[in-house]
Image (cartoon, rainbow, N blue to C red):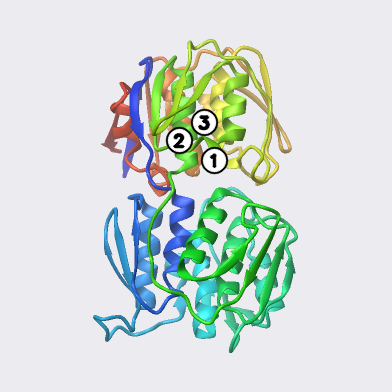
Amino acid sequence: MDKIVVEGGSRLTGRIPISGAKNAALPLLCAALLPAGPSTWKNVPQLADVRTMAKLLRMLGWEVEGTTTLNIAPPSGAKGKRKLKLEAPYDLVKTMRASVLVLGPLVARFGRARVSLPGGCAIGARPIDQHLKGLQAMGAKVTLEHGYVDVECKRLQGATIMLDMPTVTGCENLLMAAALAKGRTVIENAAREPEVEELALVLNKMGAKITGAGTANITIEGVDELQSIEHSIIPDRIEAGTFAVAAAMTKGDVLLEGARPEHLEAVTAKLRAAGVTVQAEAGGMRVKSDGELTAVDIVTQPHPGFPTDMQAQFMVMACVAKGQSVIKEMIFENRYMHVPELGRMGADIQISGRTAIVRGGMKLTGASVMATDLRASASLILAGLVASGKTEVLRVYHLDRGYEAIEKKLRGVGAKIKRAKDA
């Protein structure tokens, strides 16, 4: 098993290319299930989760070819003779929660689907009840047994769906399902994340009729069929945010190539409040810091609020900033698993329920630490960048789910970091 080894103390300067967004790529690959012909996706990030999704599509009968550009052809495509299968098995779904995103498109196009209940990072309960509630409102019969959900409907019917919470994957599943439903569907209390907007944009390119994406109410006029397209995936806002924090903590000057400032407004507002210079530039976003960071408080919220996927990274920055920070995690109830590991490096963090109180100005020291989930992995690497001595981050398979070659990108701007085999 691999580990990441970091020698702290280097100032980051230069340019970091931002990869395609994982959380946009996964639903877009599932959207390739909707048209009758092949689709092409560009700027695809090279991540474990993307490879898992490609494997799942192949198991369903689709042909998936390529790396940074993926060509996805259906079982009835030109190369033919591939057998259609409408089941997403436990062995794959248990490793990646986003596998459930095949549910909506399969039911919409083929009338049925069988999907294992999902897994993924152990950061808290993430049920799919909102997905199923929406499909039932559209006329689907839902059966739960033996760890699988079976959904059937000859053709989904438009409906008004009020989500209990603005769930991203739930909204995406219902968007894809409603695109081929008969009549009008309205999703109320919809997720507003850029990745949801991206999916709606792609579905509209395919011929769907969707308005309101990016707001709390999305309207979908169902169509009879969708067309194949070619599309380039948006840059990853969480990867960009992570590298922005790395630049801030190391007194760096880094241009994040391809980063879209409009997707990072909540993050950049907090960086500026901490004393970091953030500027939009042609082709990306520049982050500069003199290293004199001021404590800031954050509360994670659905977009456009502060993203939960940036909480761990900001907590590390709070450890070295001047003053005390209060962090409230309001999305997932179990997303402080990185705190004990940061404590091993000298952080002073007290947890009370969903609130973390971070006493800043601490001198972090290198240690062997264990990654517990995707964003926790990134936070431990950030800590290693400013810690004295050597930090070893173990169990980096979490990291590889969401960051493409993070050690190479950081090494390219001056970090002393490498990947090694864990003895």
The quadrant holding residue 268 is top right
Category of crowding for the residue at label 3, using alpha-carbon neighbours closer than 10 angstroms: few (below 14), some (14–19), many (at least 20): many
* Disc 1 target residue: 263
CA gap, disc 1 to disc 2? 10 Å
Where residue 47 sits: x, y (%)? 36, 50
Nearer to the camera, 121 or 151: 151
* Disc 3 target residue: 341
Q: Residue at x 48, y 20 (%)?
A: 248
Q: Residue at x 38, y 14 (%)?
A: 9
Q: Amino acid at mark 2?
A: Ala
Q: Quadrant of the N terminus?
A: top left
Question: CB atoms at circles 1 and 2 under 8 Å apart?
Answer: yes
The quadrant holding residue 16 is top left
The answer to whether 417 appears left or right of 315 in the picture is: left
The answer to whether 79 appears left or right of 398 in the picture is: left
Q: Is residue 226 above or below residue 238?
A: below
Residue at the far bottom: name it: 154
Which mark is on residue 240? 2
CA gap, disc 2 to disc 3? 24 Å
Q: Amino acid at mark 3?
A: Glu
Which badge, 2 or 3, is on the more N-terminal residue? 2
Element type where label 1 sits in the image: helix
Where residue 386 sits: x, y (%)? 44, 18
Which badge, 1 or 2, is on the more N-terminal residue? 2
Nearer to the camera, 195 or 361: 195
Where residue 90 sits: x, y (%)? 47, 70
In this rendering, which labeled residue sits more in front, label 3 or label 1? 1
Category of crowding for the residue at label 2, using alpha-carbon neighbours closer than 10 angstroms: few (below 14), some (14–19), many (at least 20): many
